[in-house]
Structure formats: structure tokens, C-alpha cells
Amino acid sequence: MGKNKEERDLIVNSLGHKWELTFTTLVVFGGAFFASFPLFYSTSFGGAYGVWMLILFCFVLQAVSFEYRNKPRNFLGTRTYEVFLMVNGFAAPLLLGAAVATFFTGSPFRLGMMHDVEWTTPWRGLDALFVITNYFLALAVFFLARTLAALYFILTVDNKDIRTRSHKQVLYNSLPFVLFFLLFLGSILIGKGYAITPDGTIALVEYKYFQNLLEMPLNTVILLIGVIGVLFGIIRAILVPQWNKGIWFAGAGTVLTVVIIAGFNNTAFYPSSVDPDSSLTIYNSSSSLYTLKAMSWVSLIVPIVIAYIWYAWRSMTRKAMNIKDLEESDNKY
């Protein structure tokens, strides 16, 4: 995207001014999820720590690169940290997409009497890379991240050449995103899902996730609104080059889409492919009643948090960044 140092500085700084907010949001909502479902935390990080540690390592590379890329006396050199950012940009979405796909396809673990985790392969989560369906979501997340980034640059970077290239990147990356997203969605809707039976055991049921869509109309409507938002933001950005608001529609649509169908309607949200009865559900992996009550009160501030995130992003994107702004800034990434 950046053909010289000035253009690369604009691109990195347009992202750098908001990455801390993104990380804070990830930690807050991730922490709230783990507080509500501690068994998922212990099972996934205790068993599949290989893939999660690689993801965290990518995030560390990103954080360090933003902070040190243009620091004085940077002995590694600016280009080294740009390579680190590229490593994170390629690896993290693929690994994260594959890890999330296991919420539908399952992972090879067993739980003992004391909820101790036995991972039945030596790969420690990297076995997610051996399931073809997981690649569909991994590649969908990868190309979606690139599409959203291009839409973000269109809004936040005041540079004609970068905006022209960004419009091309929206087209080049949105097509494979839609393809792989449809492949993943289709594969789970027509495949088997891990369902909770009336006697409390876990069994594979044909078309389980498709049944969930039919039996949960509200979730289905949210999913459709999210998909429509993403497609509207992408298509209009391609057809109307002077329009720069695509990130707002595509970004909000992405958030709504990930609500999707894992864990709802008597479905395991972290299934075991080798011992279905070890699968994690909302019923068997929730925290204590006291913690859930506390988290219920905490959840009441979620609308305030969302409003603050919207306000902060709106403030950061109110004016597109140009070279002059970068030269006058005391906080450069």
C-alpha cells in the first residue's frame, strides 16, 4: 500500500492512533467472557495453548512495532518493525480464524473428573490447521481484516494515491472474503452440530446450526443485518469511489455477524471431537452464581462502553490524516 516512507508513515500512524483502544476493548470483553466461563479459559489456554500463544506472540509483535518503529536510536531499524507488523497482519488473522472455527468443528480434548484437560494430540491447538473447514473461516477472517483495513484507510488517510490503492484492495480482498465466508457458513449449516440431548449428553445432530437459525429468529435477523451491513459498506465503496464511510457499515456489520449461532439453543460452544460429553456448554462451563450475578450487573454498562468506543472512533476519524498533520504531531508511530 505504501510505496515510500511518507506513505508507509501515514498508513502505520492511521492505525497506530487507535490500536490501543482496540486492544483495550479486546481485553475488557475477553476478560468478561473468561470471568463468566472460566472452564473455557482453562480448557482452551490449558489445552490449546500452542495456537493461543502464537496469537498472543503476534499481538506482542504488533504492540512493540507500533511503539518502537520510529523511536530515536532504533537499532533494529524501521523496516524491521514494519516486517513484524506484516508478520502479525498475516499470521494473527489466520490463526485466530482457525481457533474460532473450532467452536463449531471441535477440538481433540477430554475433561477429567476435576475438569483437568487432556489434549489427545501433541499439537496443542495447532490441530485446528488440519481441518479443512477451519481454513474457510481462517481465510475469511484474513481477507475481511484486509478489506476493513482498506476501508479504514479510505476514511482516515488524506492521500490520493493511498485511497486509490485502497479502493482496489477492497475489491481484491472482498471477493475471496465472501467466497470463504459462504463456504464456512454453508459447511456448518449443512453439516452436523454438537447438540445437548434431553438426557444431558452431547450428540452430533444433522443440520443443527441450520435448525438454530430457524428456531432463533432474533439471532437470524441480527446475522442478516450484519451480513447486509458488511456487503453494503463494501459494494458502495467499490461503486462510489468518492464515498468514504464504508468502514462504519462494514465494521458494525462485522460485530453483529459474529453474534452468530455458537452456544445458543442447546448447542455446545466449545465441542470435543474425541469425547463429545467433554464439550463445553453454557450449562456446564458457567461460573458460580455469585460471579454470574456480578457479571450481570457489570453487563449493564456495556451500552456505555459501546457508546464510548463509538465516540472515540468518531473523534479519531473526524479528520483524515495527511503528511502535514504527521509532521506536526508529537506522537508518531
Image (cartoon, rainbow, N blue to C red):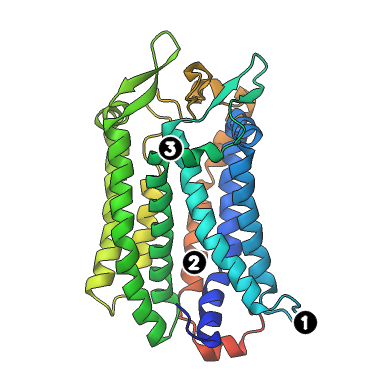
Three-letter residue code for mark 3? Val
* Residue 126 sits above or below residue 333 on the image: above
- Identify which residue, 64 or 291, lies in the foreground: 64
Residue 204 drawn at (x, y percent): 37, 20
Contact (Cβ within 8 Å) of mark 2 with mark 3? no
- Identify which residue, 299 or 109, lies in the foreground: 109
- Identify which residue, 282 or 85, lies in the foreground: 85
Residue 44 drawn at (x, y percent): 59, 34
Image quarter (top left, top right, bottom left or bottom right) of the C terminus: bottom right
Q: Which residue is mark 2?
A: 313
* Residue 309 sits above or below residue 79 on the image: above
The answer to which of marks 2 and 1 sits earlier in the sequence is: 1
Left/right placement of residue 184 relative to residue 146 reads left
- Per the image, label 1 sits on a secondary structure element best described as loop
Left/right placement of residue 323 relative to residue 189 reads right
Give the crowd class for mark 1: few <14, some 14-19, many >=20 residues within 10 Å.
few
Three-letter residue code for mark 2? Trp
Left/right placement of residue 64 relative to residue 221 reads right
Residue 287 is at least partly visible in this image: yes
Q: Residue at x 28, y 52 (%)?
A: 179
Q: Residue at x 47, y 27 (%)?
A: 271
Q: Which residue is mark 3?
A: 131
Image quarter (top left, top right, bottom left or bottom right) of the N terminus: bottom left
- Per the image, label 2 sits on a secondary structure element best described as helix
The answer to which of marks 2 and 3 sits earlier in the sequence is: 3
Question: What is the quadrant of residue 88 in the picture?
Answer: bottom right
The CA span between labels 2 and 1 is 32 Å
Give the crowd class for mark 2: few <14, some 14-19, many >=20 residues within 10 Å.
some
Residue 332 drawn at (x, y percent): 64, 80
Q: Which residue is mark 1?
A: 73
- Per the image, label 3 sits on a secondary structure element best described as loop
